[in-house]
Image (spheres, rainbow, N blue to C red):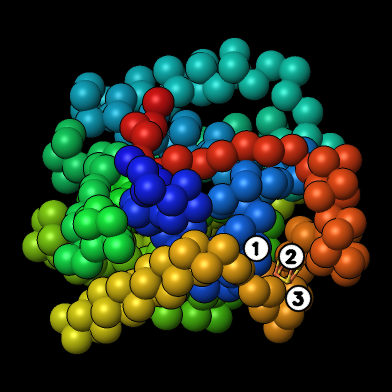
């Protein structure tokens, strides 16, 4: 259950995506998570979800058969069939670069899941606090897998990007809400708080890869846990008051908010019409099982 039965705008099951959105800007959270508004097409989300899907498919086959070449061949066959006619209009994120990324990643990241059931592991962990209606708040999400990398077992999070990889890339993930939450979840599920971010840079003519080790001390995980509870209680206050303020200092972050130009730059009474004309509504429920 994602929402309270007593207040349809009070979220009780929280994942890293909705929490990050609220942390960034409560109004953005109101638009995207509560009301589901988003741009009609986002190539980064489309490419990222396909990359994730075929990497996961490859690893599942690899785990089941133990044969890397067969796993990759069958995954590529599915990709070629299922992406026929898929056009993105993007030179770095398209069918050809996806195919290359899947093939090259299989060579580059040769570390399958530790066990078959350490792939796509969902979690729903009680935060230990409740809504005003006695509904327990839950922290939920998915760990892509647990693998042994560089001699250490840890959770693995897969990412794709068009941006050039450099040694500064690791700063993106320490600190980072999603990775910190996954460290907490991995520690609770597997007793291992460390992890790795596997990053794939897709360019027009090549891919480049990077493994970023993630380390969180026990005290850091405890800090994350307390902060998550604080943010959830702050969101509860917004939901109970029906008020989600804008954070105008966040509008230019992460390449610029998608609502910056068309929506938030206009008076509030005009925004619903603008949203209906230029955006679509699509809700994300982190409590649903991935297909
Ligand atoms: S444009 Fe700025 S104020 Fe508006 S939703 Fe985005 S971050 Fe918030």
- Which of the two marks, 1 or 2, is nearer to us in this view? 1
**In the image, farthest residue toward the left:** 191
Instruction: Answer with the quarter of the image where residue 256 lies.
Output: bottom right
Mark positioned earlier in the residue sequence (1 or 3):
1
Residue indicated by mark 3: 252
Residue indicated by mark 1: 28
Q: Is mark 1 within 8 Å of ligand 1?
A: yes
Give the quarter of the figure containing the N terminus. top left
At x 60%, y 68%, the residue is 243
At x 52%, y 73%, the residue is 23
Tell me whether circle 1 and circle 2 mark residues in contact (CB < 8 Å).
yes
Tell me whether circle 1 and circle 3 mark residues in contact (CB < 8 Å).
no
In this view of the protein, can residue 121 be seen by the observer?
Answer: yes
Mark positioned earlier in the residue sequence (1 or 2):
1
Tell me whether circle 3 and circle 2 mark residues in contact (CB < 8 Å).
yes
Residue indicated by mark 2: 257
Distance between mark 1 and mark 2 Cα atoms? 9 Å
Q: Is mark 2 within 8 Å of ligand 1?
A: yes
Give the quarter of the figure containing the C terminus. top left
The image shows residue 59, relative to residue 220, as above or below, that is: above
Q: Is mark 3 within 8 Å of ligand 1?
A: no
Pick the residue in front: 64 or 176.
Answer: 176
In this view of the protein, can residue 208 be seen by the observer?
Answer: no
The image shows residue 49, relative to residue 109, as above or below, that is: above
Name the spot of residue 51 as percent of width and height, x first. 53, 39
Mark positioned earlier in the residue sequence (3 or 2):
3
């Amino acid at each position: 259950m994602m929402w309270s039965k007593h207040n349809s705008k009070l979220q009780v099951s929280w994942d890293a995506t909705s929490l990050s959105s609220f942390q960034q800007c409560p109004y953005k959270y109101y638009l995207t998570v509560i009301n589901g508004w988003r741009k009609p097409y986002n190539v980064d989300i489309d490419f990222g979800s396909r990359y994730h899907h075929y990497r996961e498919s490859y690893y599942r086959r690899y785990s089941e058969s133990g044969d890397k070449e067969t796993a990759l061949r069958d995954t590529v066959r599915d990709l070629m069939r299922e992406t026929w006619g898929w056009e993105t209009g993007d030179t770095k994120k398209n069918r050809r670069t996806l195919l290359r990324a899947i093939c090259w990643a299989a060579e580059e990241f040769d570390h399958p899941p530790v066990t078959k059931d350490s792939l796509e592991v969902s979690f729903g962990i009680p935060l230990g606090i409740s809504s005003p209606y006695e509904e327990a708040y839950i922290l939920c999400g998915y760990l892509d897998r647990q693998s042994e990398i560089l001699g250490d077992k840890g959770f693995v999070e897969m990412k794709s990007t068009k941006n050039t990889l450099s040694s500064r890339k690791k700063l993106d993930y320490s600190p980072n809400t999603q990775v910190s939450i996954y460290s907490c979840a991995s520690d609770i599920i597997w007793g291992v708080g460390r992890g790795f971010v596997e990053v794939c840079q897709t360019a027009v003519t090549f891919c480049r890869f990077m493994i970023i080790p993630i380390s969180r001390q026990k005290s850091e995980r405890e800090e994350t846990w307390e902060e998550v509870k604080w943010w959830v209680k702050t969101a509860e206050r917004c939901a109970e008051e029906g008020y989600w303020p804008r954070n105008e200092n966040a509008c230019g972050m992460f390449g610029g908010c998608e609502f910056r130009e068309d929506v938030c730059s206009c008076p509030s009474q005009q925004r619903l019409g603008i949203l209906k004309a230029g955006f679509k509504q699509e809700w994300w429920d982190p409590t649903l099982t991935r297909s």
